[in-house]
Image (cartoon, grey):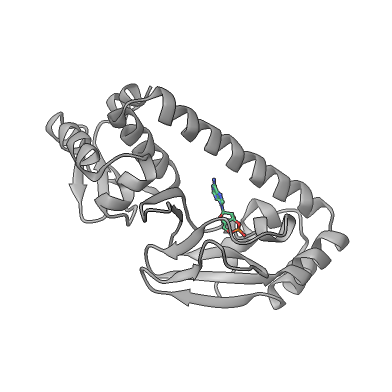
Amino acid sequence: MDIEVLRRAPLFATLDDDAFRLLTDELTEVDLSRGASVFREGDQGDQLYFIVSGKVKLGRTSPDGRESLLAILGPGELFGEMALFDPAPRNATATAVSETRLAGLKNESLNALLRSRPEVSAQLLQALARRLRRTNDSLSDLVFSDVPGRVAKALLDLADRFGRPATDGVLVAHELTQEELAQLVGASRETVNKALAEFVQRGWIRLEARAVVILDMQRLRQRSR
Ligand code: CMP
C-alpha cells in the first residue's frame, strides 16, 4: 500500500517511524471503483478509513429519496470515526467518486493507538473541530448566500484542496457530476447549471467533464462573499 500520503497526514505527524510502522501493520486496504459504497447511512460501524488516493463523498438521503452531500474528502483525510467515538449507526453513506484506495483501521486498533499515543487524540480533535467549523460555514451559507454564491464558494473550496496549476488557470478535477455538485451546494441541478453557465459566460471558469478550470479566481472569490 502506498502509505506515504498517510505519513504526511497531520494525524500521524507526531508518530515516530516505529510507531507509524506498527500502525500501518494494522491497516487493511480497500479498493473501490467509482460509485461503490464503503458503508451506508444506518449501518453499524467497526472501523474508520483513511483515504490513500481518490475521493469519497459523504451523503445523506431524505425520507423521500432526495440526496444531500455533506462533504467530499480526498487523500490524507479520514472518515467513519463518529460511530467509534459515539457508538451509533453510520451518520452518512460513504461512496467513492473516482477510483479510490482506502486504508481501514479497526476500532480496537485505533483505541490501542490512542492509549499508547495520546498526542494522536489531539490531532483527531483538531480534525473534528475543523470539520465542525466547515459544517457551520456551510450551514450559514445555506441561510445567507444565494445559489451562485454557494457554487462559487464550493468551487473555490474544491480548488483549494484538489486544484492543480493549468496553462490558463487552476484545474479542479473534482470528479463530481453536476447533480452531485448541486447536492453539495444544496440546490437544484437546474439552478446550479444556470450559475455555472453564467460563470462560463463571464469568463471566470471553463467546464470540463467532472472538472472545472478556474480562469479568474479573484472574480469568483468576490462572487462567493
Ligand atoms: P460515521 O458516522 O461513522 O459514518 C459516516 C461518516 O461521515 C461519519 O462517521 C463522519 O466521519 C463523516 N461525516 C459526518 N458528517 C460529516 C460532515 N458534516 N463533514 C464531513 N464528514 C462528515
How many marks the image carries: the answer is 0
Return the residue found at the far right.
Answer: 116
Q: Is residue 2 left or right of residue 166?
A: right
Residue 165: tell me if it is visible.
no
Question: In the image, residue 5 lies at what x, y percent?
Answer: 56, 62
Instruction: Give the quarter of the image for residue 202.
Output: top left
- Residue 191 in percent (x, y) is at 22, 37
Of the pair 4 and 39, the residue shown nearer to us? 39
Q: Is residue 27 above or below residue 128?
A: below
Question: Looking at the rendering, in which quadrant would you find the C terminus?
Answer: top left
Residue 34 in sight = yes
Residue 169 location (% of width, % of height): 26, 40
Q: Nearer the viewer, residue 77 or 138?
A: 138
51 to 64, vertically: above or below: below
Residue at image coords 42%, 39%: 157
Q: Who is closer to the viewer here, 187 or 57?
A: 187
Q: Is residue 24 above or below residue 81?
A: below
Residue plotted at (53% across, 69% down)? 102
Image position of 113 with respect to 161: above or below = below
Q: Which residue is at the far left?
A: 201
Is 117 left, or right, of 13 in this rendering? right
Classify the position of the N terminus by image quarter.
bottom right
On the image, the x and y values in percent for residue 204 come to 21, 32
Position of 186 with respect to 195 (left or right) is right
